[in-house]
Image (cartoon, helix red, strand yellow):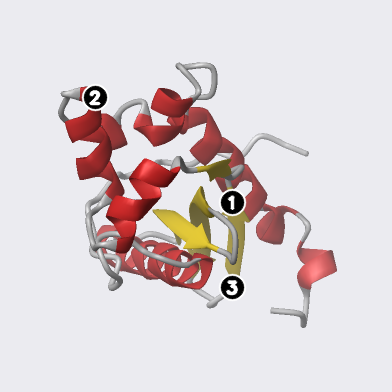
């Protein structure tokens, strides 16, 4: 693979979903919305959108990060971070409508954790970094564009 020159233009855009997405489906939709909105706002060839999500199954609630990459032709690539089990005392508050970032800030007596180390950094005592998780998710989302021949006609 050859090196590709790209300019990254960070922009703030709306996700079009709740501040705390409560399903993987909603998180993916928010990431796609952010990618499309960022591409439009930056007048770019591609857009990347990120969305932190909690998703609950019959037994537990998990935290996952979703990344979407879109291009002007409407192609969409999706990737996710790893998932981490949320402690019940956090999950219970999210079920009541609180946002994860606010809950963690309060529990840690801090401010802005969600944009720094993230909940994953708090729960793993810094051994897993939020930035690394979203980097991996972004690289996975780019697979759609790096291996176009596998995806042609599929998405």
Disc 2: which residue = 108
Q: Quadrant of residue 51?
A: bottom left
- In the rendering, at what x and y percent does residue 58 appear? 59, 66
Extreme-right residue of the structure: 150
Q: CA distance from mark 1 to mark 3?
A: 17 Å
Quarter of the view holding residue 97 = bottom left
Q: CA distance from mark 2 to mark 3?
A: 40 Å
Q: In which quadrant of the rendered image does the N terminus lie?
A: top right
Mark yes or no: residue 48 visible.
no
Q: Residues within 10 Å of mark 3 (few under 14, many from 20)?
A: some
Q: Left or right: 128 with respect to 20?
A: right
Q: Of residues 58 and 147, which is closer to you in this image?
A: 58
Residue named by callout 1: 80
- Which of the labelled discs sits on residue 40, or is there none? none
Taking the spot 67% from the left edge, 58% from the top edge, the residue there is 145
User: Which type of secondary structure does the marked residue at label 1 adopt?
Assistant: strand
Q: Residue at x 61, y 42 (%)?
A: 82
Q: Is residue 80 above or below residue 84?
A: below
Of the numbered discs 2 and 1, the one sitting upstream in the chain is 1
**Which one is earlier in the sequence, the residue at label 2 or at label 3?**
3
Q: Nearer the viewer, residue 4 or 31?
A: 31
Residue picked out by circle 3: 75
As rendered, which of 95 and 9 lies closer to the eye?
95
Left or right: residue 147 versus residue 60 is right
| Image vertical order of residue 41 relative to residue 131, above or below | below
For numbered disc 3, what is the local secondary structure? loop
Mark positioned earlier in the residue sequence (1 or 3): 3
């Amino acid at each position: 693979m050859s090196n590709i020159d790209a300019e990254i233009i960070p922009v703030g855009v709306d996700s079009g979903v709740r501040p705390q997405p409560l399903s993987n489906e909603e998180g993916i939709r928010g990431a796609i919305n952010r990618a499309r909105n960022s591409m439009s706002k930056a007048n770019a060839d591609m857009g990347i959108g990120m969305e932190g999500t909690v998703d609950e199954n019959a037994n537990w609630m998990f935290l996952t990060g979703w990344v979407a990459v879109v291009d002007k032709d409407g192609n969409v690539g999706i990737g996710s971070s790893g998932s981490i089990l949320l402690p019940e005392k956090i999950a219970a508050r999210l079920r009541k409508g609180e946002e994860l970032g606010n809950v963690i800030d309060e529990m840690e007596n801090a401010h802005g954790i969600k944009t720094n180390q993230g909940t994953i950094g708090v729960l793993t005592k810094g051994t897993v970094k939020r930035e690394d998780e979203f980097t991996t998710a972004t690289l996975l989302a780019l697979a759609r564009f790096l291996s176009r021949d596998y995806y042609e006609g599929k998405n």
